[in-house]
Image (tube, rainbow, N blue to C red):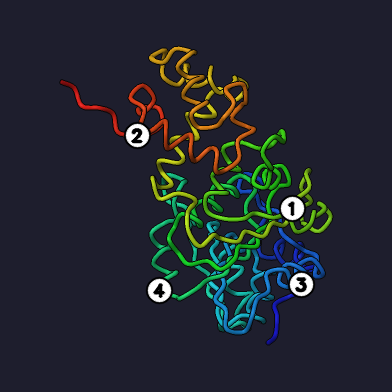
Amino acid sequence: MPRPGAPSTLPARLKAAGIRPNRILGQNFLCDGNMLEAIVREAEVETGDVVLEVGCGPGNLTARLAASARRVLAVERDPPLAAFARNALKPCPNARVLEGDALDGTGESLSTPLLSALGEEREWLCVSNLPYGAGARIVLALLDSGIPFRRLVVLLQEEVGGRLTAAPGSGAHGALSLRAAWYARVEKIRRVPPSVFWPAPKVRSTLLRVTPHGAPPTRAFGFAEWSAGLDALFRHPRKQLARGLVLASDGALDLAFARTFLGRLGIEPERRAENLALDEACRLVEAARGEAALAGAFGGRQPSAG
């Protein structure tokens, strides 16, 4: 299948079209052919696959995905860029460019037009160079959408990638790591230097592989409740867990009870939230949701008055 213009000519082609990269929108375009090919290889795109690309920009990656997949749905929120990509991808009849934001007005869920466009395919891949500012939110929204993704291979700012993949006890481990772990195994594939982009960003990027689990780690509550519980857990991340629970309860718990409560769960009261593994955090959130003094902070059902 023929491909649109070479990535190395992209700056001149965009300039001729009157398009300048918008840093506010995180527009740093991949212009290295070898890196584009490497991303498609890492994604293991097969001839029968349908692929979602969020933030397609000028269509460089889109064209390579279309050469390997059955169908590609590319989303681009910037109207001039969407028109540029649509024109550049005319040689790729199996690629469609959807103009619009991938996220809805809350910034936490996929937009209705995108959900409608995704339709009822049996399985999707997502392969994307995500906008820096919204990358983590897009990953979580994709995982929470109910769309059947086999795999996500996404390029993100290195600092964000580090937080998504951080292990318990590391400095980067936190609520974002645990939110992602609820849905998927997240792995770093490779570091990506600024030199493969135009314009070159001031930070490095990282390519991640996100493999969804077959089922959530607990059926006691859902992702919204999980997020509420993590917000409560990490409201005071530098505090020991027992002290953090007292603060989360607005003083309704005393420190002795908080220590006993954690001890019953097999969690040392002196630990901090950043040291909790997924199963430990799930046990703690579930128990806190059932504890009257903590239910409000952790999104649980509070006892009725009277």
Which residue is located at x 77 percent, y 57 percent? 197
Residue closest to the eye, 129 or 279: 279
Quadrant containing the C terminus in the rendered view? top left
Q: Quick check: marks 3 and 1 in contact, CB under 8 Å?
A: no
State how far apart marks 3 and 1 are (Cα): 16 Å
Q: For the residue carrying disc 3, how many other residues have a C-alpha within 10 Å: few (<14), some (14-19), or many (20+)?
A: few
Measured along the vertical axis of the image, is residue 118 above or below residue 230?
Answer: below
**Earlier residue among tags 1 and 4:** 4
Q: Quick check: marks 4 and 3 in contact, CB under 8 Å?
A: no
Measured along the vertical axis of the image, is residue 252 above or below residue 112?
Answer: above
**Earlier residue among tags 2 and 1:** 1
Q: For the residue carrying disc 1, how many other residues have a C-alpha within 10 Å: few (<14), some (14-19), or many (20+)?
A: some
What number is the disc on residue 120?
A: 4
**Which dot, 2 or 1, sits closer to the camera?**
2
Q: Amino acid at mark 3?
A: Glu
State how far apart marks 1 and 4 are (Cα): 31 Å
Q: For the residue carrying disc 2, how many other residues have a C-alpha within 10 Å: few (<14), some (14-19), or many (20+)?
A: many
> x, y percentage for residue 22?
64, 49
Residue labelled with disc 3: 37
> x, y percentage for residue 256?
48, 13
Q: Amino acid at mark 1?
A: Thr
State how far apart marks 3 and 2 are (Cα): 47 Å
Residue labelled with disc 2: 300
Residue closest to the eye, 36 or 146: 146
Q: Quick check: marks 2 and 1 in contact, CB under 8 Å?
A: no
**Which dot, 3 or 1, sits closer to the camera?**
1
Q: Residue at the bottom extreme?
A: 1
Residue labelled with disc 1: 206
